[in-house]
Image: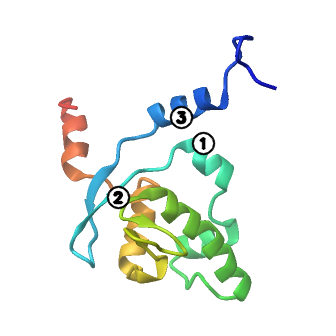
Amino acid sequence: MASDGNHLATPEDFCRAAAASRPEPERVVLPKLGKPVLLRRPTPMWFLFHGQLPTSLAARLQAGQVGVETVEDLRALAEWMVPLLEEVFVEPRLSLHPGPGEISPDWLHVEDANFVIRWAVGEVADEDRDLASFRGDA
């Protein structure tokens, strides 16, 4: 049903509002690659609708244990990690089937992938920005 004359919100209205509220991309240097990429932190709603890292796997990772012990662990990690990386990478884009200007997740060094995941969930931040907000400069 069209919302032309009934003054109801359209899908385009929601799309524009969502785009306007998304965080700006940030230039981030990947530690292993040593080059910058553009990343955007996911919104809290993204995490809500896409789920978190499976609890049992997260607990083992937090305890410093080897995280992936079973095929199910590997599948759960991939099902969580790939959509997260696809959401975070702005430039270059990340895709399981890369085209021009895109990269495959398997092209990422594990150190860079771990860094991006930690950055996406807020464990890694721009030190200058952190200090500026602490000083009240932000």
The Cα atoms of the two marked residues, 2 and 1, are separated by 20 Å
Disc nearest the viewer among 2 and 1: 1
Q: Report which residue position mark 3 lands on.
A: 18
The reply, left or right, for residue 59 in relation to residue 95 is right
Determine whether 90 is above or below 24 in the image.
below
The reply, left or right, for residue 81 in relation to residue 100 is right
Q: Report which residue position mark 1 lands on.
A: 45
How busy is the neighbourhood of tag 1: few (under 14 within 10 Å), some, or many (20 plus)?
Answer: few
Q: Are marks 2 and 1 in contact (CB under 8 Å)?
A: no
The residue sitting at 60% across, 42% down in the picture is: 45
Determine whether 17 is above or below 49 in the image.
above
The residue sitting at 58% across, 63% down in the picture is: 83
The residue sitting at 43% across, 50% down in the picture is: 41
Determine whether 22 is above or below 83 in the image.
above
Viewer-proximal residue among 77 and 16: 16
The residue sitting at 35% across, 42% down in the picture is: 24
Tag 2: residue type? Val
Tag 1: residue type? Met
SS for dot 1: helix
Q: Report which residue position mark 2 lands on.
A: 124
Q: Position of residue 37 (x, y in %)?
A: 29, 62
Viewer-proximal residue among 122 and 8: 8
